[in-house]
Image (spheres, helix red, strand yellow):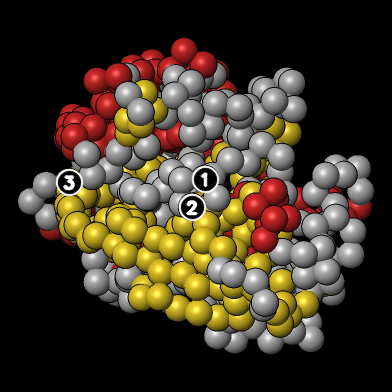
Amino acid sequence: MRLRILALFTLYFCRSVLFAQITVSNPSKSDFSETLAILASDSMQGRKANQRGGILAGDYVASKMNSYKLKPYNQAQDYFQVFTIEEHTVKKTSLQIKKRNYKTISLSPEKDFEVIPTTNSIQKKQAEVVFASYGLELSKENYDDYKNIDVKNKIVAVLSGFPSDQDSTSSTYKKLKKIFPEENDLEETKLKTAISKGAIALIIIETGENFKPQNKENEVFHSLENTITTSIPVFRISKKTAENLFSKSDIPLKNNLASTSLKNVKINFSIQLKHETSYVGNILGLIAGKDTTKTIIVGAHYDHLGIKNDSIYNGADDNASGTSGMLALAKKWSESNIKPEYNILFAAWTAEEMGLLGSQYFVRNLNDQNILLCINMDMISRSAPEDKTHRILSIGTQKETEYLKKIAQESNEKLQNPFALDLWETNGHSGSDYASFTAKGIPVMTFFSGFHEDYHTPRDTYSKVDLDKVKDVLFIVNASILKFIENQH
């Protein structure tokens, strides 16, 4: 009996030692700095997914994966997962307001409104208008702008922002800002809510004084080929335009924001689109694990905005930083010569800036593959203006995966100079590629170091990145992967 107990103890001890010895060196600045600089260089032309810069960047990322001896994913011949996307270009659009006893007022797309179209042209439609305050329905917060109003088959007009969004000291602001940390999360929530209520179009009244509609006659909307969409068009008008179109009793823009049906107002709209198809590709490199039926993904999108008005949008932080970090981790895991317990898939997603299209395509074609965890890195080299010490790091996980928060905290504590962590829940948010995986119930950890004034401008250049911050973020990512694997046993 003693021998049996001793044998079991020895076996357990050896197994523990074995897992304890599994370690992979953390990337140094030299492992990613050159890659980041190249991806953010003018030669990459802003890396727009379906333009020459996107092709150049994709070839470069694939060459790095090859140099690190990664295997092509899913028995493919190369690292590219190629698919088609559709561009829906607005060729002609109209928006007319008709008030009882008044003549019809036609708005100009050059001066009065912007439009985000659906994937299909829309012939001229006329519908009644309902004002729904901020267009939010938040049951947990006991807040509902749609209470007692019917918007089915009608057009919904809502204000931009959220209640008390101009008072950052108020409790309402703090509560809602935590729910909607990013503007695109807030707007997408308004759109989804309007769709769920049966609206046929959404008008967003921009309450900010600086909003000026751009000429959107050539606005482009992107989608995966043959996508069936339930989206509706979104028209954006200025506060000044709204004040000229609607009476104060129709849409109160200052104080009383009660939702109401505008019985004396009808709107006509139409959208004519031109459709074009193009090829794009995710780049996927694999380190095969002992158990090839299970996979951990380390991903980042490599596309950006391309060239606009002769200016190159280099996208150093967004997201050459995440892509170079992903490749640096691939390099270290490959050099370790360790066969991990599970597959580790290093993924460079395309067309994130067009609506998470690359990661969506990947998820749609997963078949029966078991994804244990998806790590996402999007903008990990800069800091928000309020982060004076440059030591704030946001890590998003689902509400249901509390253990991943613990892994993040434990990994952060190993740093010589730990970050001040902003641990948030991704539920209901869709700001980056992590959302494609959460929609399928796949656990995620998404890393983000803060919005800055150069976001989505030509000023997001390599000269402004914080290489030390990238290095420490990659330390946490690497430690989290190792801890996650360890916890699975």
Looking at the picture, how far across and down is residue 126, in whole percent? 50, 79
Neighbours of disc 3 within 10 Å: few (<14), some (14-19), many (20+): many
Circle 2 residue? 108
Circle 3 residue? 79
Neighbours of disc 2 within 10 Å: few (<14), some (14-19), many (20+): some
Q: Marks 3 and 2, Cα distance to the nearest angstrom?
A: 46 Å
Extreme-left residue of the structure: 77
Q: Are marks 3 and 2 in contact (CB under 8 Å)?
A: no
Extreme-top residue of the structure: 463
Circle 1 residue? 111
Of labels 3 and 1, earlier in sequence is 3
Q: Residue at x 55, y 85 (%)?
A: 153
Of labels 3 and 2, earlier in sequence is 3
Q: Are marks 1 and 2 in contact (CB under 8 Å)?
A: yes
Looking at the picture, how far across and down is residue 452, in whole percent? 61, 29
Q: Nearer the viewer, residue 142 or 200?
A: 200
Amino acid type, mark 3: Tyr
The nearer-to-camera label among 3 and 2 is: 2
Looking at the picture, how far across and down is residue 442, in whole percent? 47, 65
Q: Residue at x 30, y 38 (%)?
A: 48
Looking at the image, residue 197 sits to the left or right of residue 232; the answer is right
Looking at the image, residue 327 sits to the left or right of residue 486; the answer is left
What secondary structure is marked by label 3? Answer: loop
Q: Nearer the viewer, residue 155 or 337?
A: 155
The nearer-to-camera label among 3 and 1 is: 1
What secondary structure is marked by label 1? Answer: loop
Q: Nearer the viewer, residue 370 or 447?
A: 447
Amino acid type, mark 2: Ser
Q: Marks 3 and 1, Cα distance to the nearest angstrom?
A: 46 Å
Residue 132 vs 7, above or below: the answer is below
Residue 175 vs 421, above or below: the answer is below
